[in-house]
Amino acid sequence: NGADDLETVQGHIHDTSRRFNEMKQKNNDLTRYVNQMERSIPQAQSKWKLIMADQIGTTSNLFTKFLKSNNMNGHVFANAATNEMNISVKKRGLEESNSKAAYNEERAQFYQMRGKPQSSYADLGMMSGGERSFITVSFLTAVNVALCLPFRAMDEPDIFMDNERRKKLLA
């Protein structure tokens, strides 16, 4: 019986040693994985910032394009690092509506002020319901197109718009 007890104890020691080595290997693998992830996080964050900057630029360009069809000018300024966004819209006069130089100057002024509204930009509260609806739909459509989303659904986005704006919205 003493030999059986010795064999049983040795078997337990062997099994425990094997399980310990398996756990130690899993721990080493997990530590290696965590270290690898820690090294890759700054790279992923850097790539994400580039993607976000591109998406913000694309959204702003599309937003401006949609507003131009309604004789408005606007820009989206967003800072992914601070999670801040500003949308500025300005009604364009007929003399500037077709001027690329005026548009480029307006855009440069907007980015120089880093997204802070100035007096030439309209307070959205002072615009008609149809204008605000058009601006909102323009922004949502710009985001949708920039993100390449396969579909969009909106419930009565043209409720406050006149027939002219409805036609421009659907164009």
Image (cartoon, helix red, strand yellow):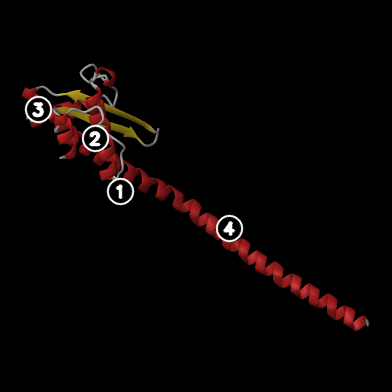
> Closer to the N terminus: mark 3 or mark 2?
3
Q: Relative to 99, is 57 on the left or the right?
A: right
Query: How far separated are the C-alphas under marks 2 and 1?
Result: 15 Å
Please identify, in this view, whether the residue under mark 1 or under mark 4 is nearer the observer.
1
Q: Earlier in the sequence, mark 2 or mark 4?
A: 4
Q: Nearer the viewer, mark 2 or mark 4?
A: 2
Marker disc for residue 31: 4
Q: Position of residue 127 (x, y in %)?
A: 23, 20
Report x, y in % for residue 9.
Answer: 84, 75
Residue at which label 1 appears: 149
Residue bearing the label numbered 3 = 97
| Label drawn at residue 1 | none
Amino acid on which disc 2 is placed:
Ser
Figure quadrant of residue 24: bottom right
Q: Earlier in the sequence, mark 4 or mark 3?
A: 4
Task: For mark 3, give the secondary structure.
Answer: helix
User: Disc 4 on helix, strand or loop?
Assistant: helix
Local packing at callout 2 (Cα closer than 10 Å; few below 14, some 14-19, many 20+) is many
Q: Is residue 102 left or right of residue 146?
A: left
Spatial separation of the CA atoms under disc 3 and disc 2: 18 Å
Q: Position of residue 79 (x, y in %)?
A: 35, 34
Disc 1 crowd rating (10 Å Cα; few below 14, some 14-19, many 20+) is few
Q: CA distance from mark 3 to mark 1?
A: 30 Å
Report the Cα–Cα distance between label 2 and label 4: 49 Å
- Asked if the residue under mark 3 is in contact with the one under mark 4, i.e. CB atoms within 8 Å, the reply is no
Q: Residue furthest right?
A: 1
Q: Position of residue 14 (x, y in %)?
A: 76, 75
Q: Give how far apart the Cα atoms at labels 4 and 3 are.
A: 61 Å
Is there a contact, CB below 8 Å, between mark 3 and mark 2?
A: no
Element class at badge 2: helix
